[in-house]
C-alpha cells in the first residue's frame, strides 16, 4: 500500500482545476503499480503510461506559466493545432493516460467493494477483468485483447498483490483495503475531472490499437 499512499493526489479545488505539476509528480509514481500485477503482459500498459507522462511533461515544461493546469494545456493546444487537434501533443497523451488511470481506479474500487469470484475468493481476475472491460477493451483490437486474456491467468493472488503493493511488507488485508479507500478519494475525483475535460471539449478519440 506504501506504493500508493506515499504519493497521494491532491484534493481538487472547487473549480476542479487540476494543477499540472502536482498531478505529474503524483502520477509518475504509478507505473510500478503494474509490476504488482505480476505478468509481463501488463508491461505495455506500464510503458504507455510512462510515455504519456513524459509527453505531457515535455509540453508543460515549454511554458509552465501558461500550462499551470491540465485544462489550460488542452484548451491551448486546441487553439495551437487547429484541425490536427486532438490527435497531437499533450492532449493525445493525456487522452490515453486517463484510460490507464481509469483502469487502476476501477480495479482498486472493485477490490475495496469486495467483488470476487466466490469459488476462488483470493483471485483478482474478476477485478482486473472489470477494469479492463470498462477502461481499455473498446480501444484494443482483437490481438491486444487476446494478450490481455492471457494475462488474466497469470494475475497474482489478492494476498500477493496486496503484499507487493505494500513493498513486500506483510499487512492485514482490511488495513490495506482501508488505505486504498483513502487513496481513491482524491484519485477518483482527479480521473473523473480529466474525463469531464474531454467530454466538455469533445476531445476523445475512439480508434483502436
Image (tube, rainbow, N blue to C red):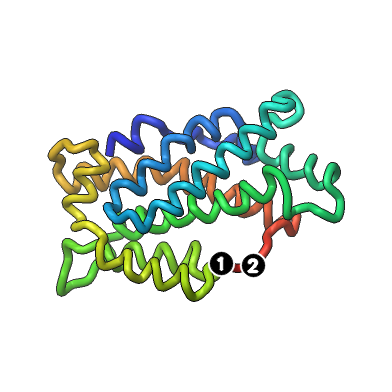
Residue 112 vertical position relative to residue 6 in the rendered view, above or below = below
Q: Position of residue 18 (x, y in %)?
A: 61, 37
Quick one: label 1 or label 2, which is nearer the N terminus? 1
Quarter of the picture holding the C terminus: bottom right
Residue count near mark 2 (Cα–Cα under 10 Å), binned few <14, some 14–19, many ≥20 = few
Q: Residue at x 55, y 49 (%)?
A: 97
Residue count near mark 1 (Cα–Cα under 10 Å), binned few <14, some 14–19, many ≥20 = some
Q: Residue at x 72, y 56 (%)?
A: 203
Residue 171 vertical position relative to residue 43 in the rendered view, above or below = above
The dot on residue 101 is: none
Instruction: Report helix, strand or loop for mark 1.
Output: helix
Q: Is residue 14 visible to us here?
A: no
Q: Is residue 146 visible to us here?
A: yes
Q: Position of residue 53 (x, y in %)?
A: 55, 39
Relative to the observer, which residue lies in front, 138 or 114?
138
Q: Position of residue 69 (x, y in %)?
A: 67, 34
Q: Position of residue 41 (x, y in %)?
A: 36, 58
Relative to the observer, which residue lies in front, 185 or 87?
87
Amino acid at each position: 500500500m506504501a506504493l500508493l499512499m506515499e504519493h497521494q493526489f491532491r484534493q481538487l479545488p472547487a473549480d476542479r482545476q487540476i494543477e499540472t505539476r502536482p498531478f505529474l509528480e503524483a502520477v509518475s509514481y504509478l507505473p510500478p503499480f503494474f509490476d504488482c500485477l505480476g505478468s509481463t503482459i501488463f508491461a505495455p500498459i506500464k510503458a504507455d503510461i510512462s510515455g504519456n507522462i513524459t509527453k505531457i511533461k515535455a509540453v508543460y515544461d515549454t511554458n509552465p506559466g501558461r500550462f499551470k493546469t491540465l485544462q489550460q494545456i488542452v484548451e491551448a493546444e486546441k487553439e495551437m493545432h487547429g484541425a490536427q487537434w486532438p490527435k497531437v501533443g499533450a492532449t493525445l497523451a493525456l487522452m490515453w493516460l486517463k484510460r490507464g488511470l481509469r483502469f487502476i481506479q476501477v480495479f482498486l474500487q472493485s477490490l475495496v467493494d469486495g467483488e470476487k469470484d466466490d469459488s476462488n475468493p483470493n483471485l483478482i481476475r474478476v477485478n482486473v477483468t472489470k477494469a479492463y472491460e470498462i477502461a481499455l477493451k473498446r480501444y484494443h483490437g482483437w490481438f491486444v485483447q487476446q494478450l490481455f486474456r492471457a494475462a488474466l491467468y497469470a494475475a497474482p493472488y489478492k494476498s500477493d498483490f496486496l503484499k507487493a503493493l505494500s513493498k513486500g511488507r506483510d499487512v492485514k488485508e482490511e488495513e490495506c483495503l482501508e488505505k486504498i479507500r483513502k487513496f481513491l478519494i482524491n484519485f477518483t475525483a482527479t480521473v473523473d475531472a480529466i474525463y469531464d475535460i474531454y467530454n466538455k471539449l469533445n476531445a476523445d478519440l475512439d480508434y483502436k490499437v
